[in-house]
Image: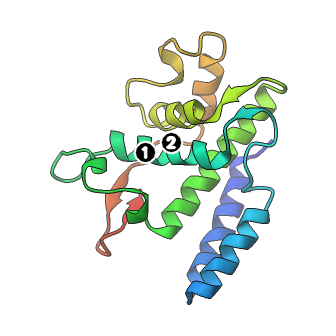
């Protein structure tokens, strides 16, 4: 089971790696190492679709459901390329940790990764829709509980023009 302590340790490792990056060659090497890290790989159990598909939906849901200072949805003006690399890494780790928890809670069960990712963002942030709203009649309560362990987060535009989590 992935504990919050494990998650924090992994986030610190990733943050240190990102802080140490200085060139695009170093960035590419770090991404390659992280792709081989079993902690960051896609759900090893049964999930329809790839981790990248699920992560793409996670990002789209985050941008679609979050608003900027002007009150407009972030996806009106931003996309994945506008999210800072550190934030993308944090989001990957959070989604992977959630998917690992789902796998351990429902061994042998098959889920659609994009739907899990979409409802994970909505549920953890209290958007009024998600795992508990009826699409997950047998698993909704447990998936909601797992989501809430991650706490709420929001996306904002930093002084660097990139999107960040808070």
Q: Secondary structure at mark 2?
A: helix
Rendered position, 123 above or below 161: above
Point out residue 34 in the picture as x, y percentages from the top left corner: 72, 67
At 18% from the left and 45% from the top, the residue drawn is 71
Rendered position, 138 above or below 60: above
Mark sitting on residue 43: none
At 57% from the left and 35% from the top, the residue drawn is 114
Q: Is residue 21 visible?
A: no
Point out residue 132 in the picture as x, y percentages from the top left corner: 52, 18
Q: Secondary structure at mark 1?
A: helix
Residue 79 quadrant: bottom left
Q: Which residue is mark 2?
A: 57
Determine contact: label 1, label 2, CB under 8 Å.
Answer: yes
Q: Quadrant of the C terminus?
A: bottom left
At 78% from the left and 23% from the top, the residue drawn is 109
Q: Which residue is mark 1?
A: 60
Point out residue 136 in the picture as x, y percentages from the top left corner: 59, 16
């Amino acid at each position: 089971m992935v504990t919050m302590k494990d998650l924090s340790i992994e986030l610190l490792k990733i943050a240190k790696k990102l802080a140490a990056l200085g060139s695009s060659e170093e960035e590419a090497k770090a991404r390659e190492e992280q792709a081989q890290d079993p902690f960051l790989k896609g759900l090893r159990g049964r999930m329809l679709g790839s981790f990248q598909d699920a992560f793409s939906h996670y990002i789209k849901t985050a941008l679609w459901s979050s608003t900027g200072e002007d009150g407009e949805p972030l996806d009106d003006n931003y996309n994945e390329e506008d999210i800072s690399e550190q934030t993308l890494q944090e989001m990957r780790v959070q989604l992977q940790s959630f998917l690992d928890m789902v796998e351990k809670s429902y061994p042998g069960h098959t889920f659609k990764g994009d739907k899990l990712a979409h409802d994970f963002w909505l549920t953890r942030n209290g958007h009024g829709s998600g795992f508990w709203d009826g699409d997950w009649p047998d698993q909704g309560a447990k998936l909601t509980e797992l989501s809430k362990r991650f706490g709420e987060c929001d996306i904002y535009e930093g002084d660097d023009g990139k999107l960040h989590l808070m």
